[in-house]
Image (tube, rainbow, N blue to C red):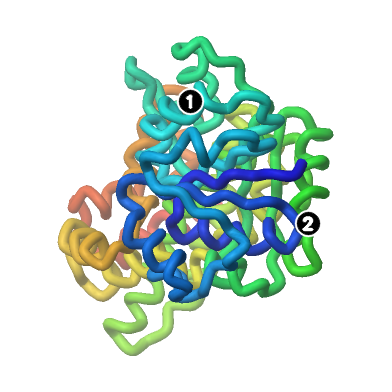
């Protein structure tokens, strides 16, 4: 592998270019129609507006009307746009893949099909490709505790690449490995893809615990720890129901990613706002104004639909997911009571 094109110039797409450059790859970065100001900053040698790190001048940038040029000759294409943007970008990009050996995905979320069935993003790509008559190369799902700014600044980082074909995952892991960007290869695509959006959902509850401390001056560390443990249990259960390995949730995509997101991620910050007493809609509107995408909000509703469609028999074992959904829908007046009831063990 020599040339790799990252689709999406946001925080994670831009941040990922650093290890790819350090690994000796020819890196292209394409910005969507929403990324012009980000590309402007990169091309001017200024810090990326969302991660405050200067992107290497070895990265070749492309604007939204240069998609074909950006992808041409690429051995790998990385989907790194928001989950809501995946279908639109996929319809434009998939017919241009040519001889690409693989598609990598850092995008995190769920995707409804035209009939309203909730799909994991790799399955959505396969469906869109079939509709377009395009043959897809293998898909590699990427998830793990990666803050984009630290990745972009070459801080020690661990992540997991998951693919149905473990040898493809290993090939990708070898190609992108650097001294500071270490990759575990996995054959559990489903497990990696379930953890990626669900950790955003559950990080909201961790933020609520921190927000309660800010509002009251009293720490809620015990509650946060109980929420963390319950979140991992629920991710593992839901993943298993969809065909994942139970241990994936207890590895980098689950425990690792929830830890880093619960420390400082946007979903945690949103939860802090709720814990301080802000209303869900108002908190989301303010973060949207600040260009802080809170992917856990749409992911929560989609996860609820996914459970009703494919995992209704374990719904009773997912109390934290249901509590978060009720909070986001404005059905809860006491977020402390809602989270507490969801995460404290029941009497045996």
Dot label at residue 124:
1
Q: Position of residue 336 (x, y in %)?
A: 32, 67
User: Quick one: SS at disc 1?
Assistant: helix
Instruction: State the separation of the CA atoms marked 2 and 1.
Output: 28 Å
User: Quick one: SS at disc 2?
Assistant: loop
Look at the picture and state if 320 lies above or below 244.
below
Asked whether, in this view, residue 6 is left or right of residue 316, the answer is right
- Total numbered labels placed on residues in the image: 2
* Res 95 seen here: yes
Dot label at residue 177:
2
* Res 321 seen here: no
Q: Are marks 2 and 1 in contact (CB under 8 Å)?
A: no
Q: Residue visible at 52% across and 41% down?
A: 70
Mark 2 vs 1, N-terminal side: 1
Disc 1 crowd, CA 10 A, few/some/many (<14, 14-19, 20+) = some
Q: Quadrant of the N terminus?
A: top right
Q: Residue visible at 39% across and 72% down?
A: 209
Q: Position of residue 149 (x, y in %)?
A: 53, 70
Q: Position of residue 146 (x, y in %)?
A: 60, 62
Residue that lies at the very extreme toward the bottom in this rendered image? 217
Q: Quadrant of residue 59?
A: bottom right
Asked whether, in this view, residue 20 is left or right of residue 179, the answer is left
């Amino acid at each position: 592998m020599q040339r790799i094109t990252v689709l999406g110039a946001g925080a994670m797409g831009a941040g990922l270019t650093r290890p790819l450059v350090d690994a000796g790859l020819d890196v292209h970065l394409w910005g969507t129609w929403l990324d012009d100001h980000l590309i402007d900053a990169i091309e001017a040698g200024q810090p990326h507006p969302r991660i405050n790190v200067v992107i290497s001048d070895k990265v070749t940038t492309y604007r939204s009307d240069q998609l074909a040029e950006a992808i041409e000759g690429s051995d790998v294409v990385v989907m790194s746009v928001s989950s809501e943007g995946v279908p639109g970008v996929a319809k434009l990009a998939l017919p241009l893949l040519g001889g690409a050996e693989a598609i990598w995905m850092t995008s995190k979320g769920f995707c409804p099909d035209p009939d309203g069935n909730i799909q994991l993003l790799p399955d959505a790509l396969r469906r869109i490709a079939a509709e377009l008559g395009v043959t897809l190369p293998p898909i590699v799902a990427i998830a793990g505790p990666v803050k984009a700014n630290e990745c972009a600044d070459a801080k020690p980082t661990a992540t997991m690449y998951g693919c149905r074909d473990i040898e493809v995952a290993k090939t990708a892991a070898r190609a992108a490995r650097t001294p500071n960007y270490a990759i575990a290869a996995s054959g559990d695509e489903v497990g990696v893809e379930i953890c990626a959006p669900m950790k955003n959902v559950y990080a909201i509850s961790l933020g609520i615990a921190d927000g309660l401390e800010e509002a009251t001056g009293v720490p809620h560390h015990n509650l946060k720890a109980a929420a963390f443990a319950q979140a991992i249990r629920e991710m593992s259960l839901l993943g298993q129901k969809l065909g994942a390995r139970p241990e994936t949730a207890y590895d980098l995509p689950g425990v690792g990613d929830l830890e880093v997101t619960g420390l400082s991620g946007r979903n945690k910050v949103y939860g802090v706002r709720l814990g301080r007493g802000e209303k869900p809609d108002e908190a989301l509107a303010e973060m949207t104004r600040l260009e802080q995408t809170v992917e856990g909000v749409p992911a929560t509703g989609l996860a609820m639909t996914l459970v009703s469609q494919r995992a209704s028999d374990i719904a009773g074992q997912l109390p934290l997911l249901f509590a978060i959904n009720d909070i986001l829908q404005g059905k809860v007046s006491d977020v402390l009571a809602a989270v507490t009831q969801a995460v404290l063990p029941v009497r045996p």
